[in-house]
Image (spheres, grey):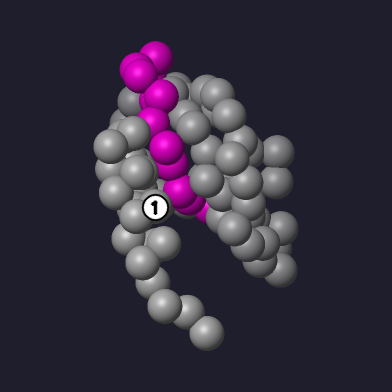
């Protein structure tokens, strides 16, 4: 399996952290030297290992923001 190249361009913020030190984060990441995308996934400390995640282009992250703003939470 080919190595995946990534560069975290901007750390937006952490959403949570588990008892093993992994944190679920929203970052702006360039994958394989492509245009950066917003990305939500779990990261090991020092960002050496990562879990599965989901990426969003700018239009998708704006649509997600609108959906989240419309949620009625306690």
Q: Nearer the viewer, residue 66 or 6?
A: 66
**60 with respect to 23 (left or right):** left
In the rendered structure, does residue 41 fall within the stretch colored magenta? yes
User: SS of the residue at dot 1?
Assistant: helix
Q: Position of residue 45 (x, y in %)?
A: 70, 46
- Residue positioned 59% across, 40% down in the render: 12
Residue 73 in the image: state x and y as whole percent.
47, 79
Q: Which residue is mark 1?
A: 65
Identified at 39% across, 62% down, the residue is: 68
Using the image as rendered, state which of residue 11 and residue 72 is in the foreground. Answer: 72
Q: Quadrant of residue 18?
A: bottom right
Quick check: can you spot residue 14?
yes
Residue at x 42%, y 37% (from the top left corner): 38
* Picture coordinates of residue 21, whole percent (x, y): 71, 58
Crowd tier of the residue under label 1, counting other residues whose Cα lies within 10 Å: few below 14, some 14–19, many 20 or above: few
Q: For residue 4, which quarter of the picture?
A: top left
Quadrant of residue 17 within the rendered picture? bottom right
Residue 49 can be seen in this image: no
| Magenta stretch holds residue 25 | no
**Relative to the observer, which residue lies in front, 66 or 4?**
66
Specify the segment rendered in magenta: 31-42
């Amino acid at each position: 399996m080919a190595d995946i190249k990534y560069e975290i361009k901007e750390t937006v913020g952490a959403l949570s952290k588990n008892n093993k030190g992994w944190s679920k984060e929203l970052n702006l990441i360039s994958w394989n030297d492509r245009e950066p995308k917003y990305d939500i996934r779990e990261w090991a400390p020092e960002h050496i290992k990562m879990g599965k995640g989901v990426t969003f282009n700018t239009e998708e992250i704006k649509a997600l923001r609108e959906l989240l703003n419309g949620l009625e939470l306690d």
